[in-house]
Image: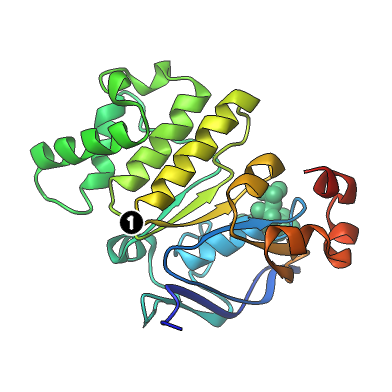
Amino acid sequence: MSDPLLSVRNLSKRFGGVVANDDISFDIAAGELVSIIGPNGAGKSTLFKTVCGVTPPRSKRGPDSGKVFFRGRDTSGFAAHRMCEAGLALVFQETEPLKGMTALENAAIGALVRTGSFHEALRLGGQALERVELGHRADIMVDELTLAERRRLEIGRALATEPVLLLLDEAMAGLTPTEVQSAVALVQRIAGDGVTVILIEHVLQAVMAVSQRIIVLDRGRKIADGTPSDVVADPAVITAYLGSELSNA
Ligand SMILES: Nc1ncnc2c1ncn2[C@@H]1O[C@H](COP(=O)(O)OP(=O)(O)OP(=O)(O)O)[C@@H](O)[C@H]1O
């Protein structure tokens, strides 16, 4: 087997007395589409933030122990901008467009990771907006976008950084069932373009529809890692994680 694109090794992270991530290991191969699920507070967002060098203010960057390898390099503790330059983009749970700017200008900000020319960044941002089907909203101020459009814009801005690995943290939260369906189609298109995708998602309909593999966290630990059908039948998962919802998904 070729080397994994991302390798997380025995990663632990605590906040004071809270062990948010406890000895987590997994590999992600290039081209995989993987979901990470688990109850609230399981440690999913912390894992993403540690992997890509984003940690809360005043907190030490990177894992407390363990390692993260990305594209064959030890990237443990790399700052977020270095991870982004290396080809990893994270879309946060909270949509945070740059206010007072258009959708196109927001997307172009992502492209500035790849070019020093604002003109070229606008061109690349425009392409990214087309990929998320927001081309027709390019000149709209971000404050006027709907939640579903803002979520797409965040993905567009991340795509404008030209990632090889895209981490999406609850990119479908708050969307209507129809919007979830088109978000699922978008994620599948992005994966079809060759981008490796890891989703954190509570919308199980979406998780079951897109995932080749599911990793389950509970109270900071990895408790399952397998195909969707194996994971939903896993007794440890059913016990930990809203069993009825999983078995109905
Ligand atoms: N900056 C922080 N300071 C202190 N505790 C934190 C911080 N970030 C996360 N935690 C704690 O770490 C644990 C894991 O939180 P995390 O947000 O990673 O979980 P999650 O699985 O993403 O949850 P959710 O599904 O609700 O988003 C929780 O107990 C949370 O309160």
Asked if residue 176 can be seen in this view, the reply is no
Between residues 12 and 236, which one lies in front from this camera angle?
236
Say if 91 sits above or below 105 in the image: below
Q: Is residue 133 above or below residue 112?
A: above
Instruction: State the image quarter where residue 177 is shown.
Output: top right
Secondary-structure class at tag 1:
loop
Instruction: Give percent across and percent down for residue 81.
Output: 32, 60
**Rendering coords of residue 87 (x, y %):** 32, 62
Q: Quadrant of residue 150?
A: top left
Q: Is residue 161 left or right of residue 247?
A: left
Residue at 58%, 78% in the rendered image: 64
Indicate which quadrant contains ligand 1. Answer: bottom right
In the picture, the quarter occupied by the C terminus is: top right
Q: Position of residue 117 (x, y in %)?
A: 9, 45
Determine which residue is flagged by label 1.
Answer: 163
What residue is rendered at 49% in x and 37% in y? Answer: 185
Report the residue at 31% width, 17% height from top: 140
Q: Around disc 1, counting alpha carbons within 10 Å, would you say few (fewer than 14), some (14 to 19), or many (20 or more)? A: many
Percent x, y for residue 19?
Answer: 73, 69
- Depth check: give the residue in front, 31 or 59: 31
Q: How many callouts does the rendering have?
A: 1
- Asked whether, in this view, residue 103 is left or right of residue 151, the answer is left
Q: Amino acid at mark 1?
A: Pro
